[in-house]
Amino acid sequence: MAHKRTNPESLSFPQNYHHSVEADAGCKYLFVAGQTATAKDGSIPQGIEAQAELVFGNMQKVLAESGYGFEDVVFMKSFLINREDRDGYQSVRARVWGDIKPASTFLLVSGLASPDYLLEVECCLLYTSPSP
């Protein structure tokens, strides 16, 4: 589904997101819990880029399991513990998501569930099945 994504000209132009994303009435909702950089074997990679790759890979698997993809995401919230990791995170996000830019919030937090996590990302999507 093509959501209506907008950036008012009266605001600064955002780098990796849209200021708003609108979906049609009658949509299905899917809320994806915060994804961390935990591999299936329980390992956690070092460094923000490796963790961001795994976080988005995990998120993509969760979405695919429910029949969706990044293009269906309308809102994403990112939690990082180190301000200096922002550029590395944003670089991976821009490459992985490409032109798909959901509305989003970026937060710096004092810690996450494991001291080894550098970030956590959650998202929400709205989806309308194509008309028959």
Image (tube, rainbow, N blue to C red):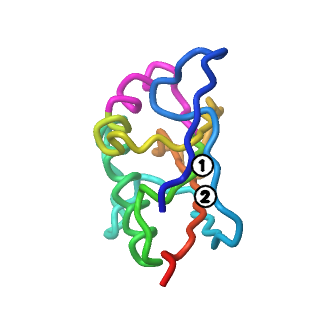
Q: Kindly state the secondary structure of the residue where label 1 is placed.
A: strand
Residue drawn at point x = 60 percent, y = 48 percent:
75
Q: Which portion, as a residue range, is magenta? A: 79-91
Amino acid at the residue labelled 2: Cys
Badges 2 and 1: C-beta atoms under 8 Å apart? Answer: yes
Task: Pick whichever, 92 or 129, lies toward us.
Answer: 129
Residue 89: x, y in percent? Answer: 40, 32
11 horizontally vs 37: left or right: right
Magenta-drawn stretch, dominant element (helix, strand or loop): helix
* Residue neighbourhood size for the residue with mark 1, other residues' Cα within 10 Å, grouped as few (<14), some (14–19), many (≥20): many
- Looking at the picture, how far across and down is residue 118, in whole percent? 47, 39
What residue lies at 57% left-to-right and 54% top-to-bottom? 123
Where 87 falls versus 60 (above or below)? above
Instruction: Say what secondary structure mark 2 lies in.
Output: strand
- Residue located 39% across and 72% down the image: 64
Q: Quadrant of residue 88?
A: top left
Examine the structure image and report whether residue 81 is included in the region drawn in magenta.
yes
CA gap, disc 2 and disc 1: 5 Å
**Mark 2 surroundings within 10 Å by alpha-carbon count, few (fewer than 14), some (14 through 19), many (20 or more):** some
Label 2 belongs to which residue? 124
In this rendering, position of residue 120 left or right of residue 43: right
Pick whichever, 113 or 16, lies toward us.
16
Where is residue 19? Give x, y as percent. 62, 32
Q: Is residue 9 magenta?
A: no
The residue to which callout 1 is attached is: 75
At 32% from the left and 40% from the top, the residue drawn is 98
Q: Position of residue 27 (x, y in %)?
A: 65, 70
Instruction: Looking at the picture, tell me which residue is in the foreground, 7 or 68.
Output: 7
> Which amino acid type corresponds to the residue marked 1 in the rendered image?
Phe
